[in-house]
């Protein structure tokens, strides 16, 4: 499949059992054999579960807790949302069970606030971007790589109990944990200084990415 040009819109979709769980419009920064790199800033369009929107708007923890059972039973609704308050880059290598995200503060000097390793199924490219599936486990890393902590291990365990995370997924995530930690400890891959992610800024002339028509149709 033909690669994407810098500045194009590419949509990341999380797909579970041939149904879209979320869709996120992103801007292509570069597309190389090593990784698809995508940028996001305030205003980017998303289609996400209504339970997640309710939780963000109200802080009601019960809304967040309904999300995984809804996912397991294939019973969810999507609503419109826009990205807010931060900017980030997604570094998505092929055939890898995680992506690396760099988050930036858009209110000041656009400094890197933290790295975020998102464990997910390997991407499958589509004409509008790529499909994957978030496997619930995350790793939050300090900007200077000096420390890190695991996030959402409780949700990951619940996802395993509900069958959302299969045993094969779990085995792959175990190997991916070690792979991601090796990159962090070595300061290599997307964490390498020469990659330039520390000082990334979005191109000011690029428009805010929007979701295309038919984004919820999975072929």
Image: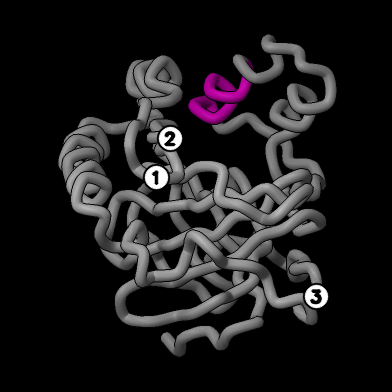
Query: Which scheme is used to colour this image of the protein?
Result: one colour
Measuring 51% from the left and 52% from the top, which residue is drawn there? 102
- Residue 200 locus on image (x, y percent): 57, 67
| 79 with respect to 72 (left or right) | right
Q: Using the image as rendered, state which of residue 35 and residue 169 is in the foreground.
A: 35
Measuring 53% from the left and 26% from the top, which residue is drawn there? 73
User: Which residue does the numbered mark 3 point to in the structure image?
Assistant: 207
Circle 3 — which element?
Answer: loop
Near mark 2 (Cα within 10 A), the count class, few <14, some 14-19 or many ≥20, is some
- Residue 182 locus on image (x, y percent): 18, 47
The span shown in magenta is 66-73
Residue 144 is labelled as: 1
* Pointer 2 or 3: first along the chain: 2
User: Which residue does the numbered mark 2 point to in the structure image?
Assistant: 140
Assign the magenta stretch its main secondary structure. helix
Question: Per the image, is 70 magenta?
Answer: yes
126 vs 190: above or below: below
| 177 with respect to 152 (left or right) | left
Near mark 3 (Cα within 10 A), the count class, few <14, some 14-19 or many ≥20, is few
- Residue 198 locus on image (x, y percent): 49, 60
99 vs 8: above or below: above
């Amino acid at each position: 499949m033909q690669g994407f040009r810098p500045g194009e819109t590419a949509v990341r979709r999380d797909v579970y059992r041939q149904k879209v769980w979320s869709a996120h419009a992103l801007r292509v920064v570069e597309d190389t054999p090593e990784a698809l790199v995508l940028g996001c800033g305030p205003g980017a369009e998303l289609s996400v579960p209504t339970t997640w929107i309710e939780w963000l708007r109200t802080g009601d923890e019960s809304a967040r807790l309904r999300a995984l059972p809804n996912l397991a039973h294939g019973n969810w609704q999507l609503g419109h949302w826009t990205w807010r308050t931060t900017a980030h880059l997604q570094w998505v290598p092929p055939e890898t069970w995680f992506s690396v995200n760099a988050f930036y503060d858009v209110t000041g000097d656009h400094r890197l606030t933290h790295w975020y390793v998102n464990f997910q199924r390997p991407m499958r490219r589509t004409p509008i971007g790529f499909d994957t599936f978030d496997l619930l486990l995350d790793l939050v890393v300090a900007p200077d790589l000096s420390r890190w902590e695991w996030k959402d291990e409780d949700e990951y365990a619940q996802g395993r109990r509900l069958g959302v995370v299969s045993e094969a997924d779990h085995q792959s995530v175990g190997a991916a944990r070690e792979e991601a930690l090796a990159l962090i400890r070595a300061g290599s891959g997307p964490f390498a200084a020469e990659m330039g992610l520390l000082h990334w800024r979005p191109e000011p002339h690029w428009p805010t990415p929007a979701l295309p028509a038919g984004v919820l149709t999975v072929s």
